[in-house]
Image (cartoon, rainbow, N blue to C red):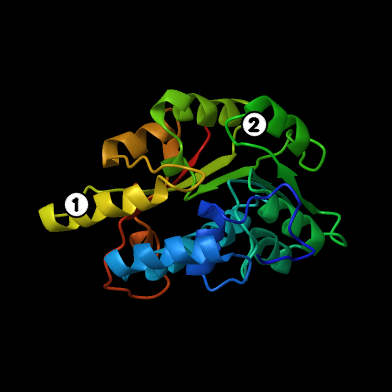
Amino acid sequence: MEELKWVPSTVDVTRPSVARMYDYYLGGSHNFEADRAAAKQVEQIFPGVAQSAQANRSFLRRVVRHLMEQGVDQFLDLGSGIPTVGNVHEIAQHDNPDARVVYVDFEPVAVSHSNALLADNPGANAILADLRATSAVLAGARETLDFSRPVGVLIIAALHFIQDTDSPYEAVAEYMDALPPGSYLAITHATWDTLNDEERAEAEQIAKIYSSSDNKLKMRTHAEVTKFFDGMEMLEPGVVAVNDWRPDSFDEAHVGIYGAVARKP
């Protein structure tokens, strides 16, 4: 069994973690054999999964830069995952060294490694919490973020691991209700909307693989993803595939992940 100093003793490295699988797709090194085995199973069914993860990451980069241009220099990254190249604080603080970022994840490896990287960064930190625990997350975030000024809430590739029975819409609304006008919400969410019958069968196999991890998949339709932004001002081009949201390069590859950004009026 792999033994590394940055791994909390409570972590079960024999059970796949969606955060560590995502780290593997992005080419990171903070994953274990169980994560790699599950991720490779997914890759065998869907060889484009790593490309989708990278397109998702590129969307995040474009969103943070856009919000910085709008004067937003505080970010609450919910379900942030394991730090890899191009983290939110790296993007934001490159343009504004005083930018503040709070990462939130319930994966101990993600939070442990995040705080190790951020030890000398007073403007950023990570909280070990489930994004569904809104009151606890908001209380922790207030120690770093100024809620009297606009905040960019980022929920990247996290909501499709939350079932409807866990009230994801209510959780998102609670976060936005706690923030002032001019705050933004950015979401990416996996979907099966564009799949044909053969692709849907493959997707069902992938869902079974994730069912053995720490979170099961919950795919949502275009309308269901749009519902997360109720009451907000949607930025153009609306809810689209992540590689179609204000792209800075042309990519013909299909990505089954919706992405959108909206502003709190």
Q: Nearer the viewer, residue 43 or 93?
A: 43
Residue with the mark numbered 2: 180
Residue 259 relative to residue 24: left or right? left
In x, y percent, where is residue 68? Answer: 62, 57
Q: Quadrant of residue 123?
A: bottom right
Left-right relation of 216 to 68? left
| Disc 1 residue type (three-letter) | Arg
Q: Name the residue under label 1.
A: 200
Residue 156 in the image, given as x and y percentages of width and height: 50, 50
Residue 100: in sight, yes or no? no
Task: Give the Cα separation between the discs numbered 1 and 2.
Answer: 41 Å
Q: Which residue is drawn at 36% across and 62% down?
A: 42
Callout 2 secondary element: loop
Residue 226 versus residue 68: which sits nearer the camera? 226
Residue that protrudes farthest toward the left in the picture: 197
Instruction: Say which residue appears at 62% left-offset and 56% top-offset.
Output: 13
Residue found at x 58% / y 71%: 28
